[in-house]
Amino acid sequence: MNVFDGCDGQRLEMTNGGTAVFVDVLMLAVSALAHRPWDFRFAALLTLQDQNVMGRGVVGFGLAELDWGDTPQERAAAKDFLLRVLDLALSRHRWEELTYEPPRAEGYLRTYRAMVEEFDPATARAGTGVLPKPREAAVASCVRHRVLDALPFWQACVFCTAGV
Ligand SMILES: [Zn+2]
């Protein structure tokens, strides 16, 4: 079980298998939309949710733990990016490439989208270090799977480590 926290005690709890699906479909969407520096830091955070590397049941993060930016404009842009990622994932972007059926993914995504929508980035706690630093942002794509991989942390994407 892994937990992704929102605000006011809201939380998305997923089984280890459910979390892996959630990360996979978000990775497909993030890789299509990442454009600004913050987006690639969030992509790096997603690569760190890879339970094949980090361990089963030990991933997850809270929205309030992220560094959303120093100005209202930066914070709004970051939240907008995350909402667009969730919307693209909800449109089943590249789901035909998955090697499994993701029956619960849509429910997870809808729940998480509502949590992000309601979350005010101005209430986030500064300095938690949860969001990877700019120099740790995901910079490379996995050639085989065409998603951002975990460099500079390790050279593999979430589909590589799953043995797909
Ligand atoms: Zn790969």
Image (cartoon, rainbow, N blue to C red):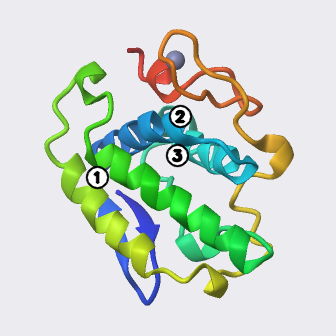
Mark 1 C-beta closer than 8 Å to ligand 1: no
Tag nearer the camera, 2 or 1: 2
Q: CA distance from mark 2 to mark 1?
A: 24 Å
- Please provide percent x and percent y for residue 100: 20, 26
Q: Which residue is tagged 1? A: 15
Residue at x 62% of width, y 51% of height = 42
Q: Residue at x 37, y 81 (%)?
A: 10
Q: In the displayed structure, does residue 41 sit left or right of residue 97?
A: right
Task: Classify mark 2: residues with Cα within 10 Å, few (<14), some (14-19) or many (20+).
Answer: some
User: Residue flagged by tag 2: what amino acid is it?
Assistant: Ser
Image mark for residue 49: 3
Q: Measured along the vertical axis of the image, is residue 2 above or below residue 68?
A: above
Q: Secondary structure at mark 3?
A: loop
The residue at which mark 2 appears reads as 31
SS for tag 1? loop
Q: Is 73 in front, or is 19?
A: 73
Can you see residue 145? yes
> Is residue 46 toward the left or the right of residue 130 in the image?
left
Q: Residue at coordinates 34% horizontally, 45% vertically from top-left?
A: 89
Q: Is mark 3 within 8 Å of ligand 1?
A: no
Q: Mark 3 packing: few (<14 Cα in 10 Å), some, or many (20+)?
A: many
Distance Cα–Cα, label 1 vs label 3 = 13 Å
- Is mark 2 in CB contact (under 8 Å) with mark 1? no
The image's mark for residue 99 is none
65 is higher (above) or lower (below) than 104: below
Between discs 1 and 3, the one toward the N terminus: 1
| Quadrant showing the C terminus | top left
Q: Which residue occupies the extreme front position in the image?
A: 73
Would residue 74 be found to the left or right of residue 29 on screen? right
Q: Nearer the viewer, mark 3 or mark 2?
A: 2
Query: Which numbered disc, 2 or 1, marks the residue that appears first in the sequence?
Result: 1
Instruction: Tell me whether circle 3 and circle 2 mark residues in contact (CB < 8 Å).
Output: no
